[in-house]
Structures are given as C-alpha cells and as structure tokens.
Amino acid sequence: MLFGKYVNKYYKKFFLFFLIGVVALIVVDVAQTFIPRFLGQIIDSNNELIVDSEKLGSIIGGIILVAGIMFVGRAVWRLSIFRASTGIAAGLRKEMFLHAEKLPPAYYHENKVGNIMNWFTSDIEEISDFFGWGTVMLVDAVFLSASVFISMIRLNPWMTLLTAIPIILIIIWGMLVDRFMSKLWEGRQKEYDKLYDFAQENFTGIRVIKAFVKQNKEIHAFAKVAKKNQEVNVSFARLSVFFDVIIELILIIQMGFLLGFGGWMVYSTIVGNPVVIFGQTISMTVGELMEFVGYVDLIVWPMIALGQIVSMRSRAKGSLRRISAFLDTKVDVFSPPNAVSLDGGAGEIEFKGFSFRFPGTNDYALKDITLKIKAGEHIGIVGKVGAGKTCLVNTLLRLYNVEKGQVFIDGHDIMDADIQSLRNHISYAPQDNFLFSAEVEENIAFAASKINHERVVEAAGFADVASNIEAFPKGYQTVSGERGVTLSGGQKQRISIARAEYKDAPIMILDDCVSAVDVKTEETILANIANTRKDKTTLLIASRVSSVMHMDKIIVLDDGKLSAYGSHNELMKTSPLYQRMVFLQELEKEMEGGSKRG
C-alpha cells in the first residue's frame, strides 16, 4: 500500500468503500476458482460410457451460479473501490488548491506554473490509479493467488510445489526492480514538468511569438524539450517492458513445464504405470490436468498484477513525494491568534519607519518610510521605475509579512489584523489588469457572491467604460477571453478599475491604471474618483504627474525612500525631484506639440 501523512487520513475516510470493494473482490476471486473444477468434472464425466445428465446439469447450474456471483461482485467492487480512489484524488486536489491559495507570491516566482499544474494533474492521477487499480491488483495478487493455490494443493500437492517456484522468482525480481523504477519515474516527471511549462508559456505568449515571427524558433526549442522527455520516457518504458517480459517468460516456462510434466503423468496413469515420487503414487486424469491448467491460467493475472503493482507503486511513491513537498511548503502569511477585525474602519493608513525587503533578498526595496494618510484622503504616488511604488501598496494587502509596529490601518497593526478582513477593507486594481476568462459583468462583480447588475453599470460608468461595453454585441455578457485577450489595453484597465469600484471598500488602490487611456478618459476617471470617493481613501500610482497633481497629497519615492510628501503646490516649492518630473513631462508635451505642428 501507499502511506504518507497526506494520504493516511483517506484510509479512514473511505474505509467502508474499501471494505465493501475488497470483500466483493475476494468473493469474486474465490468464485473464480470453481470454474476450472467444474470444467475438469465435465471432461472426466464425458470419458465415461454413460453420461450422467443429472450430474452434468448440476455442474452447468453451478457454473451459471458462479458467473452470476462474479457479475454482481465485479459491479460492486468497481463502484466501491473506484469511488474511493476518485474521492482520494478529489480530496488531495482540493487540499492542494487551498494550500496554493495560501502560499505567498514568492513561491510562484520560484516555481513555474507548468510544474505546479503537472502536480495537480499527472501526479494526482498516478496516486488515484494506485488506490484504484493498485488495490484491485494487490487483492488479486494475495487472495486470488491464495485461493488458487489452495485448490491446486487439494488437487495435486507435488505439481503445486513445482508451480510455486516461479512465483518466488517473480517476487524477488519485483523487489530488485522497484528501486530503479522509482528513480526513473521521478526523472520522467521532472522532464514532463519542463515540457508542460514550455507549452504553457508558449500558448500564453503566442501573440508575442507571432508578432516577432519566431514560430520556427519555438518549434525547434520545443522539439529539444520533447526529445529529452521522449528519451526519459523510453528509458522508463524499456525497464517496465523488460520487467514484464521476464515475468511473462517465467510464466510461459511454467506453463510449458506444467503441460509436459502433467501430460506425462496423465499418460502414465492411462497405461497403468502411475508416477511415484518419494514413495507416493501420483495419478492424474485428463480432467484433473485441465483443471490444473485452468488454475495456472487463473494465477497468470495475479502474477502479472504483482509485476504491475511494483511499477505502479514506484510511480505513485514518486508522485506522492512531489505532492508532499508542495503541501509541506510553509505558509508564512496567515492571521495571528485573536486577530483584529478591520470591519467598519474608515481607511486611515500610517507607516512608521517602514522598511521592507523581499524574501530571499538582502537589498531593501523600501527604506524608512514614515507618513500618515488620513481617512478619506486621495493620495497620488509617483517616482521613477523601480522606486518601490507598487511594493508600498502591496504591503497594505499583506501579500508579504512586514515588521510589527511599522504599518497600521485604522490604528491597528496589519500584522495583528485578520487577513480576510484586511483584504476586504481594500479594493485593488493591479498594474497588470488581470481579467478572468468570463463575462465582463462577472469580471466587474468579482468581489460579490451575487451580481447586482445596476451596481455593475454604475462601476462601469465610474471607469468610463460603460459605452464600450454596451457597444459589444453581447454587452455585459461578452466573454473577455483568457486574461482579457479579446479586449484592448485601455478597456482591460478600465474594467479592472470598475471591478475595484464595485467592491466599494474604504481603501482603494489603483496601480498605474490610467496609463493606457487617452487624456480625456483619464480626466473623466479622475473626476469620478474625486466625486464618488470624496469620503473614502484612494491611492493612485501614476506614471504621469498630471494624473495626481489634483490629489490631496502626493507621495514621491526615490530608490525606495520617501523623497517628499505633500500637495502639488507644496512639492513644487520643496521637492527638486518632483519639480524635475513636472518639468520633464511638460517639456515632453511641448515636444509632442511641436512635432504635430511640424
């Protein structure tokens, strides 16, 4: 069997299913052993001068009864055992998904999506197969073999002893091969991870590949990855086939020996010179020989199953190790005991000497930030690329842990806050404007459990995207496609803003969400922010100073440090960096105007 801390609990959960399935399977295994006995009796009865029709009828009736028992038993064990195996797969997959949601973003920076998806698909399927077919094979290997051997011993102990020798050889062979197959399977899965990841990355970036006419280059690169995957799979298949061939060879030799030695015993019995072994006279009829052949034919499957169990268990062990490693990954962002709920807060934000560096790095992304944002204030955040703008707002969502006593919302340290209530307290429009492959209405109302169409329309109006949506053939029921592929960059940005507005949280974060829209649309959105959210805190990261100059206050970041904080007029007097940004953008406008006039 397969044991580990993440699967042991399922033995208890699905115990009844396994019990019913195994009992039904044992009944079927025992019932099968009656078939050769009945066939042997029929053959021997036909050798008599007068056929006993009553006896023949009872034998045929027995065969029909056994067939009925086997039919019902097989239906029961299939429904029970495979119900348990699929339940285990579903339970593991759910546990993995819930764990994946809790892992910090840093984990997904270090592990590719293709690898993780392979764990959720191929590895789970291997474990499910082992608990399904593996259980069937194991029970057959034990109980069917035992039932057959008992019947064989009853019929002819000496022939049984000689037949058992190949079984011992198969068991020894399986133990030797198991270790090698497990290592090869792990290597195969790693190569499959690479193949899966390469394909996923290419499908996601197909527009870039076509735009740069790099289809042939990517095809050749994929061929190399696929070739390596093929080589590892062929190596595993060779060992697996070699293992099966040796087992088949042993079974063929066993059957050949049985027919030769058994035929000699039958002949000796017929001519009246029965075989004598260790002083005991052994006779065998034709019916008994055919009965014994039937038993050996029955035992072929358990022996093959025994070999397949070795291969299947090796694969399942490798897959379970990978899944266990994933589930063992530490979740370091979680709500503390007796966490504080932020429900009902007004949206005040305060940083006290806040410094931050990403996990696994030595350099600080933010250094000694100290400022206070009053509830209801509209704050702009500007700075050069890499200044730490996105990092600053992401810490409010507690995507990463921060030092206690440095970041506060409504007077509560975010490290003491309940994560769910903290994130419910904030509506967020990310920089990458990620949209799900769903209807536009569903994307906008993503924060709600039940869609309110009127609120969706209001939120779309807030983001100045309502007219665009209504112009679509299906309006708000238009499917945006994977990652919003059917929409323009500006439309995706504005739907992302509408999604944040629909949530209507005390704090709204807009991360560079107006960079892909024209000036008129930007002005409309900024005016809507000023009017609709006049009593709610709003943080707007922008690449253009014009986007934030009318905000209550502006945060100016420079290389992770707070360079300046104040209103536009104050910064124009006190911040050389802000003055330079304003000057450069005005100069850029003049140059664009000059180019148009020229």
Image (cartoon, rainbow, N blue to C red):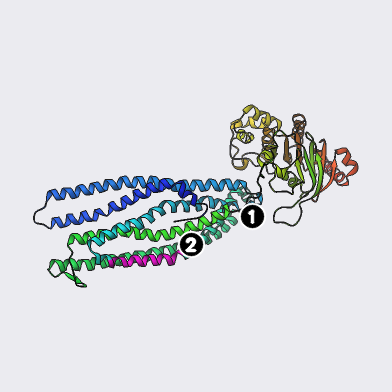
The correct choice, above or below, for 453 with respect to 14 in the image is above
Among the 4 quarters of the image, the one containing residue 597: top right
Q: In this view of the protein, can residue 473 be seen by the observer? A: no
Q: Residues within 10 Å of mark 1 (few under 14, many from 20)?
A: few
Q: Of helix, strand and loop, which mostly describes the magenta segment?
A: helix
The x and y percentages for residue 192 are 53, 57
Q: Which residue in the rendered view is the most extreme toward the top?
A: 454
Q: In this view of the protein, can residue 480 be seen by the observer? A: yes
Q: Which residues are magenta?
A: 161-178
Question: Amino acid under label 2?
Answer: Ser
Q: Residue at x 76, y 53 (%)?
A: 364
User: Which mark, residue 160?
Assistant: none
Q: Which residue in the rendered view is the most extreme toward the left?
A: 49
Asked if residue 594 lies left or right of residue 272, the reply is right
- Please tell me whether residue 223 belongs to the stretch shown in magenta: no
* Residue nearest the observer in this picture, 51 or 58: 58
Which mark sits nearer the N-terminus, 2 or 1? Answer: 1
Element at badge 1?
helix
The correct choice, above or below, for 330 with respect to 532 in the image is below
Query: Which residue is the site of mark 2?
Result: 182
Asked if residue 408 lies left or right of residue 328, the reply is right
The correct choice, above or below, for 189 with respect to 597 in the image is below
Q: Residue at x 47, y 65 (%)?
A: 179
The x and y percentages for residue 420 are 65, 40
Q: Residue at x 12, y 49 (%)?
A: 53
The x and y percentages for residue 138 are 39, 56
Query: Which residue is the site of mark 1?
Result: 110
* Residue nearest the observer in this picture, 463 or 33: 33
Asked if residue 20 lies left or right of residue 236, the reply is left
